[in-house]
Image (tube, grey):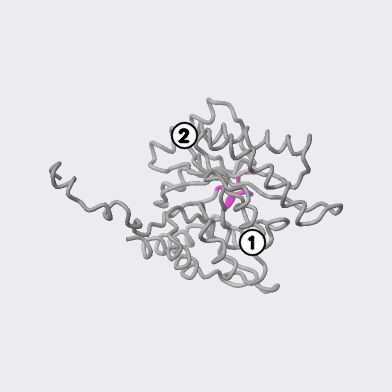
């Protein structure tokens, strides 16, 4: 484009909402049994993702053999050469801790993994809010989570990493709670990691409530509605996401009963189709 033609473009051309884009990905947790038993390595997960034409992989760190630079940079190089982005890592946290030593430990743990994410080139970390102690209540515990996220979010932001708190039971059992927490933190570096399989009632209504605040999305093949398990409606989820201007990864996190080795490839075919359908 000639310079004068570029400069003649109306300002609106730069302000319009970008077209919908959903990118197929895989959570390493889908192979949790294989990783835990060492039947698979994280390198295998990256190769598997490349073979199945995925854009990215979320590396759940629970079974990392090392956090040394030599290991992390080896993963990063492999992913780059295979054309797969390590866009996220997933860690365990319990932020329902009152100010003091325990809360400081949670903050330090997040900071440690922010450093790892930064080295891997991952722009996102999934974190958990945790469980409300029996000696407390939701209101008080939510305040504790806000405090931890504010402090951890400052460090994450300084390293270019977004913290996505997941709807994962406990303090984040209800969409209204998790949205309230994120709004109170009020940081561009703290948002929501939406997991479509973790609500137990009014599943799609709660997904719709979270969607405007989601920066990463994990899809399950099943959902539970008032104690009854059924097939997840990925098409409905995708419609909700794009209507809320979500652009990003849609990662399979497989947890159903069928063996991962046979089930995951089949579900990835469906996932790629959904992503293609809602990507312009």
Give 261 or 86, whichever is nearer the viewer. 86
Residue at image point 68% right, 50% down? 129
- Which dot marks residue 206? none
Q: State the residue lying farthest toward the right.
A: 135
Residue linked to disc 1: 198
Q: How many marks?
A: 2
- Among the 4 quarters of the image, the one containing residue 91: top right
* Quadrant for the N terminus in the image: top left
> Can you give x and y, in whole percent of width and height, for residue 108 in the image?
68, 33
Q: Is residue 230 above or below residue 165?
A: below
Q: Is residue 71 above or below residue 188?
A: above
Q: Is residue 101 left or right of residue 69?
A: right
> Can you give x and y, in whole percent of width and height, for residue 176 in the image?
64, 62
Whether 270 is among the magenta residues is no
> Can you give x and y, in whole percent of width and height, for residue 8 in the image?
17, 49
Q: CA distance from mark 1 to mark 2?
A: 30 Å
> Which mark sits nearer the N-terminus, 1 or 2?
2
Q: Is residue 187 left or right of residue 248?
A: right
Specify few, some or many for label 1: CA neighbours under 10 Å numbering under 14, 14-19, or 20 or more: many
Q: Nearer the viewer, mark 1 or mark 2?
A: 1
Give 71 or 121, whichever is nearer the viewer. 121
Residue at image point 53% right, 33% down? 158
- Among the 4 quarters of the image, the one containing residue 205: bottom right
Give 116 or 76, whichever is nearer the viewer. 116
* Residues shaded magenta: 28-35
Residue linked to disc 2: 76
Q: Could you tell me which secondary element the residue under label 2 belongs to?
A: helix
């Amino acid at each position: 484009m000639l310079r004068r033609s570029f400069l003649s473009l109306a300002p609106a051309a730069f302000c319009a909402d970008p077209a919908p884009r959903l990118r197929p990905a895989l959570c390493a947790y889908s192979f949790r049994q294989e990783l835990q038993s060492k039947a698979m390595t994280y390198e295998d997960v990256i190769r598997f993702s490349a073979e199945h034409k995925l854009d990215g992989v979320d590396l759940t760190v629970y079974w990392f053999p090392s956090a040394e630079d030599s290991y992390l940079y080896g993963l990063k190089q492999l992913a780059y050469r295979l054309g797969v982005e390590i866009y996220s890592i997933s860690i365990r946290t319990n932020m329902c801790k009152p100010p003091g030593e325990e809360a400081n430990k949670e903050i330090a743990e997040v900071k440690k993994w922010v450093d790892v994410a930064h080295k891997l080139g991952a722009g996102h970390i999934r974190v958990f809010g945790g469980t409300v102690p029996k000696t407390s209540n939701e209101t008080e515990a939510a305040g504790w989570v806000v405090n931890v996220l504010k402090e951890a979010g400052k460090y994450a932001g300084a390293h270019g990493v977004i913290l996505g708190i997941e709807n994962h039971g406990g303090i984040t059992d209800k969409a209204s709670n998790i949205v309230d927490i994120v709004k109170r933190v009020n940081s561009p570096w703290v948002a929501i990691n939406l997991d479509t399989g973790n609500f137990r009632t009014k599943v799609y209504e709660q997904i719709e409530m979270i969607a405007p605040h989601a920066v990463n999305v994990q899809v399950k093949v099943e959902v539970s509605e008032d104690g009854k398990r059924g097939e997840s409606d990925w098409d409905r989820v995708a419609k909700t996401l794009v209507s809320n201007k979500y652009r990003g990864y849609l990662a399979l996190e497989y947890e159903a009963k069928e063996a991962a080795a046979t089930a995951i490839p089949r579900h990835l075919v469906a996932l790629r189709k959904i992503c293609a359908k809602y990507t312009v």
